[in-house]
Amino acid sequence: MSDLQEILEQYSIFGEVIKETTGPLLKQIEFAPQAGTKLKNILAVEKDIARQLGVSSLRIEPVEGKNAIAFQIPAEEIKTVDFAAIINNETLWQGKGELPICLGVDVCGEPLFADLAKMPHLLVAGTTGSGKSVGLNTFILSLMRAKKPADVKFVMVDPKRIEFGMYNNNKYMFCPVVTENKEASAVLSYLVDEMEYRYNLLEENMCKNIKDYNEQYGKIPYIVCVIDEFADLMAADKSVSEYIIRLAQKARAAGIHLMLATQRPSVDVVTGLMKANFPTRLAYKVASNADSRTILDMAGAEDLIGRGDALFLASNGNLKRVHGAYMPDKQIEEFLAPLHAQVKPLKLKGAEIAEKETATASDKTAGKPVKKKSIFCKISDFWSSLRQKDKKLIIRAILALFGLLTGQSVLGGKTSRRKRR
């Protein structure tokens, strides 16, 4: 594009345009600068170049493997990336990893894949209408396309109630779609217990991760937990954040992976501890430079053009621009139709307690006599609500107290009479 070359010469930046590529959303112009040209000098006049080109969005970045700089501007005709064409292409899915997900296409229109098992978790952010929920759907469908129901199960949390309803009663579901905040907290607590159970299983069988266990012994499915608008859950229940951090820190080897999405990437939601455990992040168009720095640790996401346009930060620190693919709801329903199956709800501690409280309150409102629980039932309910770790601590404390009263030491499986003065 001669216009770009002439504009750059006005700012004493000399060189030549060597290549132009037009993708579904962007046109990329590769410019080879003269020797000694500094990239920071070009970035300093980025806004002025965009103004003179008459474009609403401009991103400048070096071209990998070349002595060239890429100028990315919106294409004259923006096209939709068809996910159905990707999902039906057999050759694209070969050798893409243990849990492959299709992020969309790159600037040139070539499909771009990533392995969720290596990420090991994904943090997604973007304003309303930027393509965030559409992207989550393509990630879920990618895993369903690549793996069998016995290999991967989904836990979906949807506070908005409208995004994941189509996946209910599906062979891939670990439990029905969760829509209530209290139930979401109970499900995450269940996943933490499941993680601890799997680690005990790996320890007993001398395996380092779920892949080694599946190769030697049996078939334990991967569990992918997808949460849309997790900022709302954190605001409703503070324990949600604790469960997410705990799963993010430890759940990789146990085969449990997280995909979180939010439209409010503020520092009180995407904390430093969370970012440390989510090195892989995907930013669609955000509202401000501060939001971009919160999610990506750098500016740029505020200048995206929307409609699935995103920046993907890999765990190794590489940043790539991707365009999310789209699949209409009707085609998704056709894809899911053969996978229909009844899914039983999980037995959740928190949900059972909330259900009992609701039933008791309704009985009081209706004027029905409420039976009082015996002290034995109350103790039994309290004991069943405890975690295994807390039960062990209580048992040790009781044994220690018994030892003090009787003058015997009963901890550690040994009984010894203490010497009296």
Image (cartoon, rainbow, N blue to C red):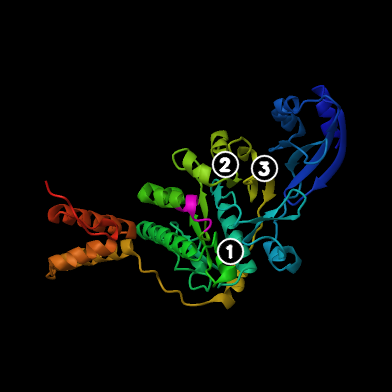
Q: Residue 319 carries which label?
A: 3
Q: Residue at x 44, y 62 (%)?
A: 200
Q: Label 2, label 1: how many angstroms apart (C-alpha)?
A: 37 Å
Q: Which mark is residue 286?
A: 2
Q: In which quarter of the image is residue 348?
A: bottom left
Q: Residue at x 77, y 25 (%)?
A: 38
Left or right, residue 65 beside residue 117: right
Q: Which amino acid does label 3 sit on?
A: Leu
Image x and y of residue 300, in percent: 64, 37
Q: Which numbered disc, 3 or 2, marks the residue closer to the eye?
A: 3
Q: Residue at x 32, y 59 (%)?
A: 387
**249 falls in the magenta region:** yes
In this orientation, does residue 300 appear? Answer: yes
Q: Give the range drawn in magenta.
A: 247-253
Left or right, residue 313 beside residue 8: left
Left or right, residue 211 beside residue 382: right
Q: Label 1, label 3: how many angstroms apart (C-alpha)?
A: 28 Å
In this view, the residue in front, 393 or 34, is: 393
Q: Residues within 10 Å of mark 3 (few under 14, many from 20)?
A: some
In this view, the residue in front, 331 or 167, is: 167
**170 falls in the magenta region:** no
The disc, 1 or 3, on the residue closer to the chain's N-terminal end is 1
Q: In which quarter of the image is residue 19?
A: top right
Query: Which residue in the protein does label 1 denote?
Result: 211
In this view, the residue in front, 237 or 251, is: 251
